[in-house]
Image: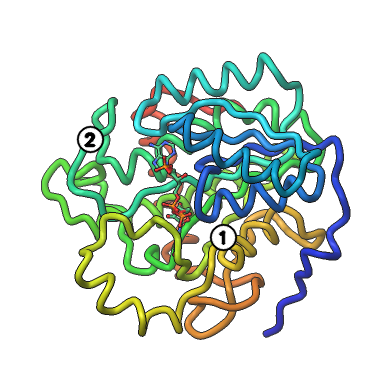
Amino acid sequence: MESTFDLNKIPAQNGRIAIVTGANTGLGFETALQFAKKEITVVMACRNTKKAEEAKGRILAEIPAAKIELIPLDLMDLASVRLFAETYKKQHQQLDLLINNAGIMIPPFQKTKDGFESQMGVNYLSHFLLTGLLIDLLNATPNSRVVTLSSKAHETGVIDFENLNAEKSYSKMTAYGQSKLACLLFAQELNRKLKTANKTTVSVACHPGVSTTDLGRHMNKVFYYVFMPVFQFFTHKPAKGALPTLMAALDDDVQGGDYFGPIGFKEMKGPPAKVKAKPRAYDEAIASKLWSISEELVGFEYDI
Ligand SMILES: NC(=O)c1ccc[n+]([C@@H]2O[C@H](COP(=O)([O-])OP(=O)(O)OC[C@H]3O[C@@H](n4cnc5c(N)ncnc54)[C@H](OP(=O)(O)O)[C@@H]3O)[C@@H](O)[C@H]2O)c1
């Protein structure tokens, strides 16, 4: 398989607006930077205003004409998600691209403000609510897209309805895998619902392979520094890791339900292309059950 995506060939898209969650660093930052280069207005949805301002400054230093806005968003708190959506809707009448990017990996056990296990809360449930609160605006914007970040970790993920928020036990890697599988099931189920309702909005997903971002901040430091010199042969820099997101957001040939990732060795690095998730990510019965439970958990019913 070959990659057909060439970011240089994507035309400028003045007049379009994108929200990128977690845009202050890593893959989110690279995504925001490339959107700005394509003249897309970028709304950086970040929890730390100081870091977000610094990141905005780095983009403006490279692209002085960039249109960058900041709206605070803390995915550990559903009230913050609601306030973000309310603020965005007061300021904008359209939304072309929603990039559900922010995430955490293998933190010590912690609950969100609303009592969810933090990885399920931040990576999945808050993005589920955010997308739902913005779906009317997305649907009112022709050819809009929702791009949700998953991971190769979905391959070992299982949706355990008896232990969705670590009610019984907590294994940080199991919880990460579950949250990233949930993101994929959500992307697929959302797309099915949009298609049934004949909307032009599409929902797609992507994964970056393995990219050297801050995501490993909770990893064992000894492991990290001993293995990194070897590991780096199997990883790529954030600018490359963001390419599957950029392809999912900007490529003309994207179809709803597509999944993008790097196509090098074991999908760990390499140029971006359409890839296949594990069969469990396409399980419609589990996706539908997860959707209903998610609506109950976040207290919001989708209207598509
Ligand atoms: N890097 C990889 O190899 C890899 C592999 C597979 C999947 N992914 C996925 O790619 C996405 C981006 O990760 P990354 O690698 O770029 O990691 P990163 O460098 O750690 O960036 C994560 C971003 O998410 C933000 N974030 C974390 N908790 C948040 C919260 N409560 N509210 C709002 N924002 C929050 C972070 O903000 P702060 O800076 O304030 O913490 C940061 O901006 C994640 O969904 C991750 O699961 C990454």
Q: Which amino acid is tagged 1?
A: Cys
User: SS at mark 1?
Assistant: strand
Q: Residue at x 31, y 54 (%)?
A: 159
From the viewer's perspective, is 219 left or right of 18? left
Image quadrant in which you'd find residue 65: top right
Q: Any atom of ligand 1 within 8 Å of the CB at mark 1?
A: no
Q: Residue at x 84, y 59 (%)?
A: 10
From the viewer's perspective, is 195 left or right of 297? right
Closer to the N terminus: mark 2 or mark 1? Answer: 2
Q: Which amino acid is tagged 2?
A: Lys
Residue 68, labelled with which disc? none
In this view, the residue in front, 117 or 298, is: 117
68 vs 32: above or below: above
- Quarter of the image with the N terminus is bottom right
Image quadrant in which you'd find residue 156: bottom left
Question: Hey, which residue is sitting farthest left in the picture?
Answer: 168
From the viewer's perspective, is 82 left or right of 262? left
